Image (tube, coloured by chain):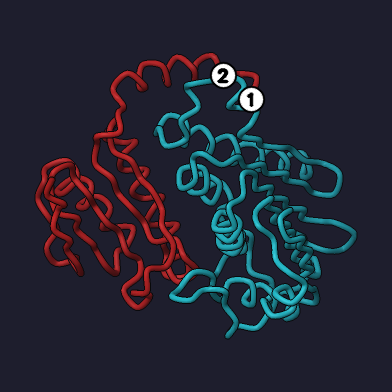
Amino acid sequence: MKELSLNILDLAQNGIKAGAKLISLEVNEDEAGYFVFRVRDDGCGMTPDMVQKIRDPFFTTRTTRKVGMGVSLVDMLTTQCGGHLDITSVPGKGTLMEAYFAKDNIDRPPLGDLPVTMKVLVVGAPDLDFTLTYKHGATGFMFDTRKLRSELGQLADFTSPVLYEWVEAFVRENIKAIHEKLEG
Amino acid sequence: MKTVADLKALREKLQSEMQVRSDSGTKVVVGMGTCGIAAGAREVMAALLDEIAKRKLQDVHVEQTGCIGMCEKEVLVDVIRPGEDRITYGKVKPSDAVRIIGDHVVNGKIVQELVVGRIERQKK
């Protein structure tokens, strides 16, 4: 995968499969010398034994095919980039994946198109809630489908073109605003 | 800049769109497992969504599914028009979205060279 926003999409899919109701994403471009992203879900969680095994590319919970290599890809990527992947999981409560990359490591893939990742997520799982917290140090913004639902009520159909295009534009414009603020 | 508070215009647009949406429309399903994503599923889904928005198609529903075990043929896209066979397209690229939406979803003409599977419609 050439963009971290694809890994984020892939890890979020694990949360969807784990039966989550809320998936919270976080990106911090500069958190104490690290580029960090977090994917948190409130799905079925994993036992400590599974958490240990999940970094192994040949481990999967699926009997046919369900969850595959996504986690081990991120694990390898973080260690190649002077970082690490932390996995915290509680059965019945959910899972938190925290990927750390040394901030200026030249091997770190670019974040890529996070607005498109958000669009694809809200359309693909329109009944789930998603949040995105995007930060550079302490500067940042938050996107939250729960806020949109409370504002829009019955109209909050994320499979509708008007709404998914709005979501993409909202995330894109706010990320751009952060970068303009940092440069200005 | 867009803010969540500034939703009046969005609400009005959604209201007029909602009146024509139903559950009986055409379904488009994109394979979004790790294999699909690595093969470009996000870009394919984005291209399909762009084409649907551009043509203002109100009653087409894009959904996602996990890995179905044909990883070598990802990106996989299924089109299910109401009352017709389910068609599976393989090795789909973003540039194919125009034909899949324009030819098949809108006009009912299957894009033959991309077809990798076909499931007969369930007879009731």
Give residue A110's position: percent from left, percent from top. Answer: 63, 64
Residue A11 in percent (x, y) is at 61, 62
> Which chain contains the residue that carries disc 2?
B
**At 36% across and 43% down in the image, what residue appears?**
B50
Q: What residue is disc 1 on?
A: B4
Q: How many marks?
A: 2
Query: Which image quadrant is residue B41 in?
Result: bottom left
**In this view of the protein, which residue sits in the foreground, A159 or A43?**
A43
Q: Is residue A134 left or right of residue A155?
A: right
Dot 1 lies on which element?
A: loop
In the figure, the shade used to draw chain B is red
Three-letter residue code for mark 2:
Leu
Q: Give the chain of mark 1.
A: B
Residue A82 falls in image quadrant: bottom right
Q: Are marks 2 and 1 in contact (CB under 8 Å)?
A: yes
What residue is pinned by disc 2?
B7
Residue A46 vs residue B43: left or right? right
Up the image or down, A8 lies above or below B102; here it is: below
Identify the colour of chain A in the image: cyan
**Secondary structure under the numbered disc 2 in the rendered image:** loop
Amino acid bearing label 1 = Val
Quarter the N terminus of chain A occupies: bottom right
Which disc number belongs to residue A118? none
Category of crowding for the residue at label 2, using alpha-carbon neighbours closer than 10 angstroms: few (below 14), some (14–19), many (at least 20): some
